[in-house]
Amino acid sequence: MTREIKTNSNLEKVLASGAFAVTGELGPPRHCSAHEVVEKAKHLVGNVDSVNITDNQTAVVRMSSLAAGILAQKEGLEANMQMVCRDRNRIAMQSDILGAAALGINNLLCLSGDHQKFGDHPQSKNVFDVDSINLIEMVRTMRDDGKLLSGQELPPDGRPKIFIGAAYNPFADPEDYRVHRVAKKVAAGVDFLQSQCIYDMARFRKFMAKAVDMGLTEKAYFLAGVTPLKALGMARYMKNNVPGIIVPDELIERLKGVPKEKQADEGIKIACEQIEEFKEMKGVAGVHLMLIEWEHMVPRFVQEAKLTPRPKL
Amino acid sequence: MIIAERKPIEEIKGFIEGKKKVLLVGCRGCVTVCNAGGTKEVGILASLLRLDAQKEGRELTVDEFTLERQCDPEYIEELLEMVEKKYDAILSMACSVGPQFLTRRYPKEKVYPSLNTCFIGGALAHGIWAEHCQACGNCIIHNFGGMCPISRCSKSLMNGPCGGSSGGVCEISKEVECIWHLIANKVMEENRLDDFAPVQPIKDWSSSRDGGPRKIVREELVK
Amino acid sequence: MSEDFEPKIIAFCCQYCAYSAADMAGSMRLQYPSNVEIVLIPCTGRFDVILALKALECGADGVYVAGCLEGNCHFLDGNIRAKKRVAYLQNEIKKIGIEPERLAMFNLSASQGPRFAEIVNDFSGVIKGLGPSPTKKKLAA
């Protein structure tokens, strides 16, 4: 699958080359010490093609995704800066996009954002001036049409060359509508999509078959989201408490079947099996690894999942 | 209608601390219908305040009066005779328009809001009200199967349910229905996915509060 | 609190059950305190919080509502509604420092004359234990 290269993004190059892409995730610290970003980045360098820098995830105040992204890029990673619609209006968003591009950010993941009710500032006012699909369209217009939302023209050398990403979640409801929501993201101009953590493979297969059928995978790259289960407790927690994540009972049973100290290994084994299937699955262009607060496991994990070495393009 | 609820009694007690003569003003508009500030609720609050004063051995007169509406000057005018009786505090039991109109007409009076104005909504059943409108000033519910995603989606999303929609409820609470779940299901049932495919344009919020406080002037009605 | 405190109690009684039970208690010559004033209501669904508030304002030390057994209301759910209203008002008076126990809801059938006498005795005992309504204490002092 070869497509026109629109940006300087390494992720885009890897995807366009037809290689199976790998993206990671790095959560910025809840303080301003750059050290933590640098430490987390060390585990990811050379193991992923690009790394998502979360934007105040779960509505908890953290170092900005732009700043942490720049710090990560200094360490040799390519940042995929996340941007949520919760905290900024269209003025701030366009401004940050211009700034990010000026500082060398090549990828932007457009998200609605978790509601602040979950975070550390539930008293705050949210924005949601634009939604994630509007945001995709806005970035695309800035890049391809050289225009701000206001119609203000951007000079040819002043257009943000951003590889545009978004999220998709086949496990949220209503199930049958999910692929149509992704179709809207594709219509809005998204270049790549990363999914929520996948555990229910049957539902994912069904979803991907539909996406392929609708021609969506020809227009955007679909990455499959993987989070190895660390323990039975985590599996149960995700099953019961995280809206939009489905953990099938078989997985719970499988983890139950191994002693506690071996559950992390089993979780990794399960994830590796999933990745083997994704490599072969029609329409899946790569994986998005979310080893949340488990970054040090990335080097071992990518090796066991046979995802390294990463292509140098 | 405007849905309101009475402030906690402790807060209202704070308003009238040290005051001896208080007027409670109800409203026969929305807040009567939503059982927050009609004649009956005025009576209950007045009684509670009197009991509280009796308990503390404190002198307190609480008079009760309910106006047809508190959002029209001609009804506010009807309160003049009462206001002339000189109260230490006037507690409006209307939505927040009421105390503001009272303040405007009787600027020397100490006017307090006894209700919290909550939202524009309707009664799902007796005793249960839900938000249905955010007064964005440019109604587009016909684009969404007759349902408003601006007021009824926690994130005011315009292009479908977010990844937190699960089992028909919103990620913020199992008590909040996911309006996008309902919209999407309706669209699918009606086989209208194609009509629904185009991306909804970025909302123009200038007709909403974001454009500044709003005002409507209908020349043909202005005297 | 004086030993000879005789509480003033108002009982809102449904005509289909509690009121008849009170009648029966009377004809059976059962002993119960005379300090309860019975107010006939067509159904406890007619009970409104303002009625109890007015009673308290006028010096009642305790107020209770007596309706049919749950599931036996002649108007289906009048007694369930009354129960909720009593609970609501208990919460409200608590916030202004009046003991919520001064309000109560009882359920009984028309044939339960002895039960009626028992309720009056028990509730009267509770109110005696609480003493005069706090709204009267200060005035007396």
Image (cartoon, rainbow, N blue to C red):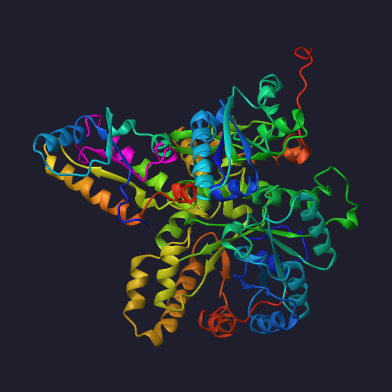
What segment carries the magenta color? C55-83
Measured from the top left, where is residue A308 in percent x and y? Answer: 60, 81
Q: Residue at x 74, y 49 (%)?
A: A138
* Rendered view: B49 above or below A6: above
The vertical placement of C61 against A246, above or below, is above
C20 lies above or below B118: above
Quarter-wise, where is residue C39 in the image?
top left
Front position in the image: C67 or A81 = C67
Indicate yes or no whether the magenta region holds residue C65. Answer: yes
C139 on left or right of C77 = right
Q: Is residue A35 visible?
A: yes
Which residue, as the protein is rendered here, is positioned at the far bottom?
Answer: A261
**Front-lying residue, B165 or A25:** B165
- The spot of residue A205 in percent (x, y) is 44, 59
Which picture quadrant has residue B139? Answer: top right
Question: Which quarter of the image is occupied by the C terminus of chain A?
Answer: bottom right
Q: Is residue C4 left or right of residue B84?
A: left
The relative height of residue A106 versus residue A129 in the rendered view (above or below) is below
Seen from the viewer's position, the closer of residues A216 and A247 is A247
| Magenta segment includes A179 | no
Taking depth in this image into account, of A304 and C40 the one nearest to the observer is C40
* Residue at x 75%, y 25% (from the top left corner): B216
Residue B35 visible: no
Q: Is residue A21 left or right of residue A87?
A: left
Q: Residue A282 location, x and y as percent?
A: 51, 60
Direction from residue B96 to residue C49 in the image, left or right: left
Q: Which residue appears at 63% of the width and 41% of the height?
A: B20
> Where, quadrant-wise, is the N terminus of chain A in this rendering?
bottom right
